[in-house]
Image (cartoon, rainbow, N blue to C red):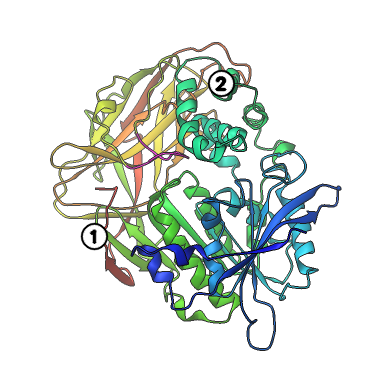
Amino acid sequence: MAPRDRMPAPLDRLRRPGPLDRLRRPGLPRITVERDIPVPMPDGVTLLADRYTPAGPRRPGGEAPPTILVRTPYGRRGPAAVINGLPFVPFGFQLVVQSARGTFGSGGEFDPLGAEHDDGVATVAWLKEQPWFGGTFGVYGPSYLGYTAWALAVDAGPELKAMALQITASSFQDAAYVGGSFALESTLTWTDLTHRQQRPFGMLTAPLLSRRRAVRAAGTGRPLADLDVLTGGAPMRFYQDLLTHHGSPDSPYWDKRDFSGRVGAVEAPVTLLGGWYDVFLPWELRDYLALRAAGHRPYLTIGPWWHADARHGLVAIRESLAWFRAHLRGDPSGLRADPVRLYVTGAREWRHYRDWPPPAMRQERWHLHAGGGLGPDGPQRAEPSRYRFDPARPTPALGGPTLLGSSKPVDNRPLERRADVLVFTSPELTEALDVIGPVGADLFVRSDREHTDFIVRLCDVAPDGTSRNVCEGGLRLPAFEEKPIGTDGTRRVAIDMWPTGHRFQPGHRVRVHVASGAHPKVAPNPGTGEPLITARTMVDARQEVFHDPDRPSAIILPIVDGPAETVVPDPAEDPGG
């Protein structure tokens, strides 16, 4: 066991006023850290952990402070320490940060997603045996750190009393295969990041350069199976695994990597934080709904953030601290009254609700019209809209959720000038339209290819013509959800889009894109049905979208007319316009 050394709490070193000052209080205690604690696993591998404790006397009665457990593949020290929960320690919590198998000194081989349940459960068993364990603990973390928490939660025992998780989900399977496609940019970016991060200066350079390498490789037009070598300089196992198991949702590969079916069995109180532009938002909300269906009362915060947006980090610390105080220290004074807190872009305000979706939400069909119109009025008889998709020159995505870098909404007008994008636009709105909840599309389509994609995007068009993306989603055909109608090859497809909380202001217009590509976020569908791992040939697809009374294609908007329980104006930067 490494010797103890003392270090000042990072919060003590923040001399300039800033958002973290909200967490400060006079006389913050110093922090004691115990480094490189060996944690044995049942298979003989040893994982390393660091333990942070507030220096000074124990709580009244002599009991040890409650523990917060974090399991991470991104390192235990340096800038990662704040993400790993170090700011909680001065407020009376022990913090144990463990490096995942095969990362930053821990033994074994890093098998992304694959070892987190067994290693997590073994770590919890070890934790309970330590003389300094006080009998209760919580788990914390964003992204992969949150996934490791879901992996152990059901089997952690009654000592697990609180979970505070951000921009994460209990399964990453659907995020890798969005709508049945392949999330090329995010998958390639993350694999390169973890491939390089343990090299000298890797934790500094990889987050900055991995996405750039991935996008550059995706733009070469080379077969997907070659892109890991182009990006990282060597074959990368996780990327190849995901390619191999694409199109196999029931593959045994996911048996020990998908915990979504167990979320309802988690007894510990859970608070979740997400962003409207985060790559994992739809599945984070699925976890929320699973908890609600099981009779639990989780808390939920969704802000105007994307995955790598630093702004949600400060909010996560503040809300998680209140959660841990309530459920590990018995002090609920910091909890808000309403469990759901949403930032509405376009309105520049926070709203509080009793549940998600908002109880006052109603779904409204806005029909696609011939000639590029859009509105809640019924469809008219007209010929279908048509376009041709060329997977060798795929339709790009100018914005939308991405793992690294900014996902701030952008002007999509350059995209709207392309012949392979259908555009449908409403008249100017005479009053505000609040769209808050799950968004979907109900399309009646026909393609000369059995294997093809349809992608739908919702945009907000400002009076000056700027067309900013709000949310999007796609579906790869053939799909289990499709409903064949008639004998002319027409198919009815239901597309789940990203949820949103957005106000379309008076004078703005609602716009919908229909396309068959969003490159490089989504790998183009080659059109042949060949497995992506071996696909080499690409063929064009000629697409038709119907919008007549018998085949009324529409976008499904969640409209909220009623007031929220609480409305808090926020003049901060609003990426939604």
Mark sitting on residue 571 = 1
- Provide residue 131's location: percent of width, then percent of height: 78, 73
Disc 1: CA contacts within 10 A as few (<14), some (14-19) or many (>=20): few
Seen at 73% across and 52% down, the residue is 48
- Provide residue 569's location: percent of width, then percent of height: 25, 65
Q: Image check: 241 left or right of 484?
A: right
Mark sitting on residue 227 = 2
Specify the segment rendered in magenta: 399-408
Answer above or below: position of 150 versus 536: below
Does label 1 or label 2 sit earlier along the sequence? 2
Residue nearest the observer in this picture, 344 or 389: 344
Answer above or below: position of 387 versus 13: above
On the image, which quarter does residue 294 sit in?
bottom right
Q: Is residue 412 visible?
A: yes
Look at label 2 and name its amino acid. Answer: Leu
Q: Is residue 33 magenta?
A: no
Residue nearest the observer in this picture, 485 or 481: 481
Look at label 1 and name its amino acid. Answer: Pro
Estimate the spatial distance between the alpha carbons at disc 1 and disc 2, rounded to whole Å. Answer: 43 Å
Quadrant of the frame with the N terminus:
bottom right
Disc 2: CA contacts within 10 A as few (<14), some (14-19) or many (>=20): many
Answer above or below: position of 88 versus 541: below
Residue nearest the observer in this picture, 80 or 346: 80
Q: Is residue 296 visible?
A: no
